[in-house]
Amino acid sequence: MSKQWMIYGAYGYSGELTARAAKERGLSPILAGRREDKVKPLADELGLSYRVFGLDNVAEVTEQLKDIDAVTHCAGPFSATAEPMMKACIQAKTHYADITGEIEVFELAHKLDSLAKAAGIVLCPGVGFDVIPTDCVASALKEALPDATELTLGFDSRSGFSPGTAKTSVEGMAQGNKVRVNGTIETKPMGKLVRKIDFGDGEKTAMSIPWGDVSTAFHTTGIPNISVYIPMPPARIKQAQKLNYVKWLLKFGFVQNMMKKNAAKVRGPNQEKRAKLITYVWGEAKNAAGDTKVARIKTANGYDVTWQGGILIPQKLLNDAPEMGGHYTPALLMGSGFVESLEGSETISIS
């Protein structure tokens, strides 16, 4: 019997992109989500089968996954949905991939490493943007400077937000900035870490943000000091600095719910707009002696990177999964050159 692949959250922005691209490439994923009125019309249009279930009960999710060999999990915010899906995958012996960028989810997958190994399955969160490009850049820099002790990553993306990404950003605003210092994740005030960076399109003012690479790049490279930057106009940096004084307010449930309700109104970019958007990815590694290596690569827009990762990595897990299961980052699973194989990507340059 052929192996079965499921896209959960298939009617969300990135989930639907992944489902449509999979169908165009002759693949037949099972589409799934908690709302039949959303998943059935898409499945009928694409001629694919579907299932309807929520993620509230791990035992029930496990039952739904017993005949599934790999899942691409696209239903965020992953702070709420990743843990039940991961645990169900472990119990059902189903490979897991998701498109999150949330530090907490990556750290959870790492904590579940031994259980995943015992089950013989792979947990690979972060198979979209920005993690694939920056994780591959981190891995390439580690190869170029093996004794690096400091890693700084960044990206200049104009892709805009989908509803799911917007909701995740709302949660992140209440947490403050995150960096890794001597192997430990620490919280810093937003807007405190600012520097000039040429991501590949000219030098810009950039601000450190709480991005997933603080976790993934550490597990990929072992480099103990990691931070992530995006370009930010000085006026926006000042706004971020002011948020530090009301961060406590953003943690209240009613505030989060109000902001997420507004975030749900966001619409992701259409195909025409995505085709015009280039993403610049940058990284810098330093060792204790002060030697430095800088890497850059241009990729397709973030959402097109995401649907490609959401298809290609599960296909790897279905057809050529590593003998040893456990927690993998995209670069550990696919190699540092994986990003270069994606449509719209160029070659990583290191100087």
Image (cartoon, helix red, strand yellow):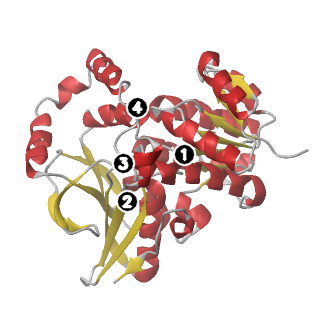
Q: Which residue type carries mark 3?
A: Ser
Q: How far from the left and from the top, in percent, is residue 52?
A: 68, 21
Alpha-carbon distance for marks 1 and 2? 30 Å
**Disc 4 secondary structure class:** helix
Dot 2, crowdedness within 10 Å: few (<14), some or many (≥20)?
some
The residue under label 1 is 109
- In the drawing, what numbered circle is on residue 278? 2
- In the drawing, what numbered circle is on residue 42? none
Alpha-carbon distance for marks 3 and 1? 27 Å
Question: Which of the marked residues, 4 or 2, is nearer the chain's N terminus?
Answer: 4
Q: Which residue type carries mark 4?
A: Pro
Dot 3, crowdedness within 10 Å: few (<14), some or many (≥20)?
many
The residue under label 4 is 163
Check whether the beta carbons of the residues at disc 3 and disc 1 lie within 8 A of each other: no
Alpha-carbon distance for marks 4 and 2? 21 Å
* Nearest to the observer: residue 21 or residue 252: 21
Q: Is residue 164 left or right of residue 286?
A: right
Question: Which of the marked residues, 1 or 4, is nearer the chain's N terminus?
Answer: 1
Check whether the beta carbons of the residues at disc 3 and disc 2 lie within 8 A of each other: no
Alpha-carbon distance for marks 4 and 3? 13 Å
Question: Which of the marked residues, 3 or 2, is nearer the chain's N terminus?
Answer: 3
Alpha-carbon distance for marks 3 and 2? 8 Å
Question: Which of the marked residues, 3 or 1, is nearer the chain's N terminus?
Answer: 1
**Disc 3 secondary structure class:** loop
The residue under label 3 is 159
Check whether the beta carbons of the residues at disc 4 and disc 2 lie within 8 A of each other: no
Quadrant of the rendering where the C terminus is positioned: bottom left
